[in-house]
Image (tube, grey):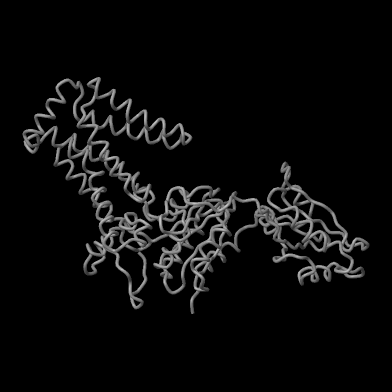
Amino acid sequence: MYTNPFETAAALHARRVPRYPCLLSARALEEIFTGCADFQSRGLRLGLESGRCVTICWIEGLVSAQTLNEDVIRPLTAISRLPDGESEGQSLLRILAGAVYNCSAQYRETTDDVVDDLTHGCCVLLFEQSCRAVSFEARSEIRRAISEPTLEKSIKGAKDAFVETLRVNTALVRRRLCTPRLKIVESQVGGTSRTRVAMLYLEGAADETVAAAFAKRLDALSSDALLATGVLEKHLTDAPRSPFPQLLHTERPDRLAQYLAEGRVGLLVDGLPIGLAGPVCFADFMRDSGDGTSNLLVAFALTLLRWLALVLSTLLPALYVAIALYHQEMIPTRLLLSVIEAKQRVPFSTALEVIGMLLSFELLQEAGLHLPNPIGDTVSIIGALIVGQSAVEARVVSPIAIIVVAFAGIAGYTLPSQDLGAAVRLARLGLVLAAVMAGLFGVGAGLCLLLLHLARLDSFGFSYTAPLSDGEALPWTRLLLRGPKRETEGRRAP
């Protein structure tokens, strides 16, 4: 029988020391929310004419005023629904049985549960005498509308993207995988933020050990506030200090659904319009979501082109520096004469030229990212045309150095993953420094260290360099060509 991988985490959470050990009452809640101007409370009489007094509490802005008025307060004050003469316990049972027009009514006895409900958009009905409460779902409908993806453009695929509301994101995934095998298990992470995190997996396709590992690491997350994906990656990945990404990021629900169908485990965080998935291998970051909508040969050609661009973006500047400094005999004569002519009036060495251009390239990219769109485009044009052309005309850098750096940068932009692109840029600079110190021998040594680092990485027990290192047949074919799978083939990540 399949067991819930979050069962252990829930048991540990239940044994934790309460954050608010005081008795459940309106006065206790007012003391907890002291200084919170958005905390609201109001006393009510059940049925208006009875002597049964209750207190309703909510946080303004998180709760819909219309839902609170029409679905909670109105039935509480209706004499026909809560007649006089009942005890407080009988009224509580009647409310839980459906006297209030609400799809969710949760019985609460602890202050911790009530505080969590209030901070997550519920209104709470307090029964002062018995120190019991009932929480109702009344979240505000104010949220960002579902729009098109901004980073992962879709040509033939769906046009919707994740938003900052967790339940909307889970619904977008559920629309793609209309089966009860899709399991969605929620947990709260962060001592202060109490952020809701949903773990998604497809029963029968996902590895149970991987799902249990995700749940265990989420439960052990000790961060005070979960407000960015970097906090999750730091605690979930096996090698958090590695610059190479170890979790798939996507803002498209169809892509996350595809990851789940392949046997991976997904994560959705309340407040973040991004989905995470694992385990992964390096080849997963070289695949684009549009490959599945293209012809098989076209997808193969594009994948091969991306791998070629990865090699050029990583090695081209380092190879140019190594050959220009130590191995000039490898350059054809006419090209060597052209390089010498361009270098005659340049006061800096080839190493300083390339390193300076790489740093300038990074500065222009950062400036374009952090400025508004019109200003960012202007900065990119100024940097590419005016600054670059002026540097060549002023004999500060040689044209060949600009061509090499620009070609490496353009090749890096073809990578589907921005996280992988950042790691490639860092590796590119390291290989250039190795080329400055030892020429091609330094490039070879740096490349060996880079490959050794990738070979040592694991993602939840799976090799990061698969399919080249998994020992199965036709590794290069499976690396570059992903054909249609038969129904009898297994679906195990990665």
Quadrant housing residue 262: bottom left
Q: Residue furthest right?
A: 49
Residue 329's place in the image compared with 271, above or below, is above
Residue 297 percent across, percent down from the top left: 26, 62
Residue located 54% across and 65% down the image: 185
Quadrant housing residue 488: bottom left
Residue 286 percent across, percent down from the top left: 32, 54
Q: Is residue 67 left or right of residue 479?
A: right
Closest to the observer, 174 or 56: 174
Q: Is residue 218 left or right of residue 477?
A: right
Q: Residue furthest bottom?
A: 1
Residue 223's place in the image compared with 110, above or below, is above
Closest to the observer, 286 or 227: 286
Residue located 49% across and 63% down the image: 215
Q: Is residue 143 left or right of residue 264?
A: right
Closest to the observer, 23 or 241: 241
- Quadrant where the C terminus sits is bottom left
* Count of number-bearing discs: 0
Residue 116 percent across, percent down from the top left: 66, 56
Quadrant housing residue 459: bottom left
Residue 170 percent across, percent down from the top left: 54, 61
